[in-house]
Image (cartoon, rainbow, N blue to C red):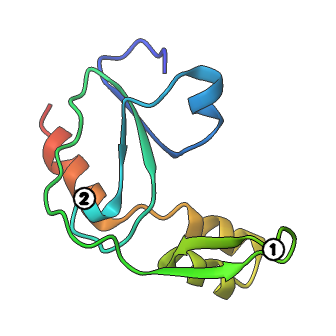
Amino acid sequence: MDANIPRIAIENPISVISSKIRKPDQIVHPYMFGDKASKSTCLWLKNLPKLVATNIVDKGEFKEWIDKKTGKTKRQASWYYDALINAKSPEERRSLRSKTFKGIAQAIASQWGNL
């Protein structure tokens, strides 16, 4: 974050960065950029404008289930729930959780690519 370069964008889900270093400059979701999915993605920016939503669509489907440990109803984006259920290993699960959606990647390229 403190590198001596003109522009920086750090992308990460909500995490320890938010509480230990500083709050993100922006939180975006795939549905703001044409992908029917919800996933909070934090952006910490240095000399870059906030991303502008390009194609707001439905947030996508969600699945609900009862947590076996707490007995509470949980709700999660279907894409994420399905990815976790179908992952064959912890490494595959980790990779699926880190997915960058195409619409966000395209917005980053088109909005920041020529700066």
> Regarding mark 2 in the picture, which secondary structure is present there?
helix
Q: Residues within 10 Å of mark 2 (few under 14, many from 20)?
A: many
Q: Would you place residue 68 above or below residue 28 in this image?
A: below
Q: Residue at x 65, y 87 (%)?
A: 86
In front: mark 2 or mark 1?
Answer: 1
- Left or right of 39, for residue 90: right
**Count of marks, rendered view:** 2
What residue type is disc 2 on? Met
Q: Quadrant of residue 102?
A: bottom left
- Residue 101: percent from the left, percent from the top? 36, 65
Q: Are marks 2 and 1 in contact (CB under 8 Å)?
A: no
Q: Residue at x 83, y 68 (%)?
A: 70
Q: Nearer the viewer, residue 26 or 8?
A: 26
- Left or right of 36, for residue 77: right
- Residue 84: percent from the left, percent from the top? 65, 78
Q: Would you place residue 114 above or below residue 23 in this image?
A: below
- Left or right of 84, for residue 50: left
Q: Residue at x 15, y 31 (%)?
A: 115
- Give the distance between the C-alpha atoms of the residues marked 2 and 1, in whole angstroms: 33 Å
- Residue 47: percent from the left, percent from the top? 26, 20
Q: Residues within 10 Å of mark 1 (few under 14, many from 20)?
A: few
- Left or right of 89, for residue 101: left
Q: Quadrant of residue 88?
A: bottom right
**Mark positioned earlier in the residue sequence (2 or 1):** 2
Residue projecting furthest to the right: 69
Q: Would you place residue 60 above or below residue 31 in this image?
A: below
The residue wearing badge 2 is: 32
What residue type is disc 1 on? Gly
- Residue 81: percent from the left, percent from the top? 59, 78
> Regarding mark 1 in the picture, which secondary structure is present there?
loop
Q: Residue at x 21, y 68 (%)?
A: 34
The residue wearing badge 1 is: 71
